[in-house]
């Protein structure tokens, strides 16, 4: 027994100790890729720059200016056509002017007896209507009716009031009674304060002044005609 124990100790001392070697797995290493470079070695060993690949030719835009020129020419032609149409319309309007516009332009004189009858009717209305507002309006309307029947034609742009004042002024009467009577009429129609009895008296005086002036004018015309 002792001999076996000694023998085992001798064997353990002579034999090398146990070792565990790890398992090594060798994986394939990737090959390095060359980096892109713009330099390339020439046969003589010098590096040269490689020019970039040339791009394609630029697009042809010469047609754009012709299109713009055509648009400008078309716009000018349209403007000229509109201008010619307007000029033609104006010429046609003047060529087709009625004779009544020519008479007004020549300051045609109204018929004095008609205006005198209108003045008499206006004074009758002033006396018959008690309300000053209604009386003054009715008197002026009588003069408007007389002016409309006096042989002078009213222009399209004239209102009846403007036309009546124009006809009354063509007979050579003073402007004061015409303007005063017109102011009383406008006040009676549009003013917030109604006319008074004094305004009614003033309107009657203006109508009488017009009637007197027309009578004198008619007599002067008669004398001039008989003298010739």
Image (spheres, grey):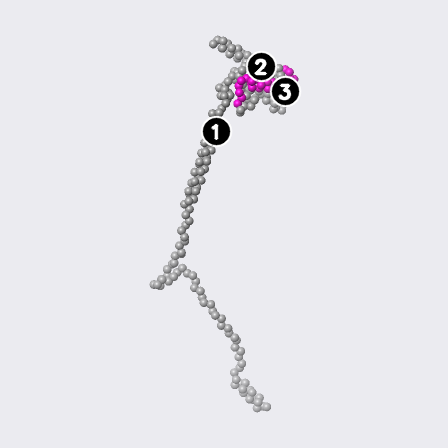
Residue in view at x 65 percent, y 19 percent: 131
| Residue 204: x %, y % from top left | 60, 15
Dot 3: within a 10 Å radius of its alpha carbon, few (fewer than 14), some, or many (20 or more) residues? Answer: some
The residue at which mark 2 appears reads as: 117
Residue in view at x 45 percent, y 66 percent: 32
| Residue 185: x %, y % from top left | 59, 20
Can the viewer see residue 10?
A: yes
Taking the image as shown, residue 37 lies to the left or right of residue 113, namely left
**Marks 2,1: beta carbons within 8 A:** no
Q: CA distance from mark 3 to mark 1?
A: 45 Å
What span is in magenta? 127-155
SS at circle 3: helix
Residue 50: image quadrant is: bottom left
The residue at which mark 1 appears reads as: 89
Residue in view at x 51 percent, y 74 percent: 24
**Discs 3/1, front:** 1
**Discs 2/3, front:** 2
Q: Quadrant of the N terminus?
A: bottom right
Image height of 77 relative to 121, above or below: below
- Residue 143 is a magenta residue: yes
Q: Which mark is residue 134?
A: 3
Residue in view at x 62 percent, y 24 percent: 192
**Foreground residue, 40 or 111?**
111
Taking the image as shown, residue 219 lies to the left or right of residue 196, namely left
- Residue 37 is a magenta residue: no
Q: Earlier in the sequence, mark 2 or mark 1?
A: 1
SS at circle 1: helix
């Amino acid at each position: 027994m002792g001999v076996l124990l000694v023998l085992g100790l001798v064997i353990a001392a002579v034999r090398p100790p146990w070792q565990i070697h790890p398992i090594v797995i060798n994986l394939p290493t990737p090959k390095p890729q060359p980096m892109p470079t713009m330099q390339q070695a020439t046969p003589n060993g010098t590096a040269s720059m490689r020019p970039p690949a040339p791009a394609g030719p630029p697009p042809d835009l010469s047609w754009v200016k012709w299109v713009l020129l055509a648009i400008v020419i078309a716009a000018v032609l349209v403007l000229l056509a509109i201008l010619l149409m307007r000029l033609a319309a104006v010429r046609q309007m003047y060529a087709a002017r009625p004779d009544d516009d020519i008479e007004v332009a020549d300051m045609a004189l109204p018929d004095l007896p008609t205006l005198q009858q209108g003045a008499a009717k206006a004074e009758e209305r002033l006396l018959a209507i008690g309300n000053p507002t209604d009386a003054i309006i009715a008197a002026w309307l009588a003069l408007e009716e007389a002016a409309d029947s006096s042989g002078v034609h009213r222009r399209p742009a004239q209102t009846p009031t403007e036309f009546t004042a124009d006809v009354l002024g063509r007979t050579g009467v003073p402007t004061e009674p015409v303007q005063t009577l017109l102011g009383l009429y406008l006040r009676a129609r549009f003013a917030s304060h109604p006319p008074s009895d004094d305004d009614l008296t003033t309107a009657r005086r203006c109508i009488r002044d017009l009637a007197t002036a027309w009578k004198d004018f008619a007599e002067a015309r008669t004398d001039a005609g008989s003298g010739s």
